[in-house]
Image (tube, rainbow, N blue to C red):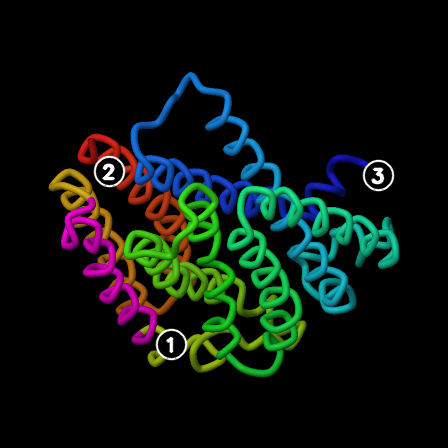
Amino acid sequence: MKWSDFSKLIKLRLTFLVTFSASISFVIGSKVNGPIDWGGRDFWTKWLMLIVGGFLVTSAANTFNEIIEKDLDRLMKRTSDRPMPAGRMTTGQGLVIGLFMALFGTYLLGKLNLTTGYLSVFSIILYAFVYTPLKRKSPIAVFVGAIPGALPPLIGYVAAHPKIDEIALILFGIQFVWQFVHFWAIAWVLDDDYKLAGFRLLPTGKRDLTSAIVTFIFAVIMFPVSLLPTIYGYGGYLVGAVSVVMSTLFLYQAYNLLKMRDIKAAQKLMFGSFYYLPVVQLMFLFDFIGKVK
C-alpha cells in the first residue's frame, strides 16, 4: 500500500490536528500533577504512548468511517480518490488495518489509565457507528459528531491526570463549541458535493439565512466559552486577551457569512477556524504553565 493511499485512508491532516490537540492537554494535565520533569523518562514515555495511541485510535475511527461510506465517497469529488472508493483497497483490507489500529491504539491509551482507554473506545464507537450513519438522516449528526470530535483534549488531559475535573471540562467545552462553527463553514463550502451523497449537514440542510444565523449564534457562544480558563482562574490575562482577539475575528467572519451568505465568506470562516483552535489552546498551555507553580 502506498503512503499516499494510507494518508487518505486515515485522513492524515485531520488525525494530526486531533493528536496535536490531545498532546497540548496532556501537558496541561501533567502540570496539574505538579512540576513537570522535562528531562525525565517517565513524562516522555507517557507522552509518546498518548501520541501513538491517539494517532492510531483516530486513524481507526476514520478508517471505519470510510468503510461504511465507501459507496457514498465514490459519489463525491472530494472523496472519490480515497483508496476504497477508487478500488485500490478492499473493504476487507481496510477492516483489518482499522481493527489493528483500534486495538493497539486502545491498548496503549489503556496502559496510561483505564479512563483514557474507555474514552478512546467510546470515541471510536460514537464517531464511526453513530455519527457516520446519521449524516444522511439529519443535521443533528453535527451535534452527535461534536462529542467524539471534542474528546481528544479530554483524553489527553486524563491520560496525564486521570480525573474529569473542571479543567478537563473546559478543554472539552472549548473544542466542542468550536466544532459547530468550523464544521458548518466546511459544510457550506462543500454543500453541493455533500448533496451528491445525500448528506444533510447544514442546520437547515441547505445554504440559507437560518443556517447562517445558527452558525453566527455559535460563534457568539464561542466568545465566553473561550474565556473560561481566565474566568475560572486557570489562565491569566494573556490567554484571555488572545481569546478575545481570536473570538472577535471569528465572530466577524461569521457575521460576514450571515451578511453575504456565499461560499467565499464561508471559506474565510473555515480557514479562520483552522487557526482559532490551536492558537487558543497553545496560549492556554503557555499561560497555564507560567501561572501554576
Q: Is residue 24 above or below residue 65?
A: above
Judge depth for marks 1 and 2 and give the one in front: 2
Q: Is residue 131 above or below residue 182?
A: below
Mark 1: which amino acid? Answer: Ser
Quadrant housing the C terminus: top left
Report which residue position mark 2 lands on. 288
- C-alpha distance separating marks 1 and 2: 36 Å
Q: Is residue 17 above or below residue 96?
A: above
Mark 3: which amino acid? Answer: Met
* Residue 211, label in figure: 1
- C-alpha distance separating marks 3 and 2: 43 Å
Segment tinted magenta in the rendering: 213-234
Tell me residue 220's x, y (percent).
Answer: 22, 66
Report which residue position mark 3 lands on. 1
Residue lying at the far top in this picture: please name it. 39
Q: Secondary structure at mark 1?
A: helix
* Rendering quarter of residue 126: bottom right
- C-alpha distance separating marks 1 and 3: 41 Å
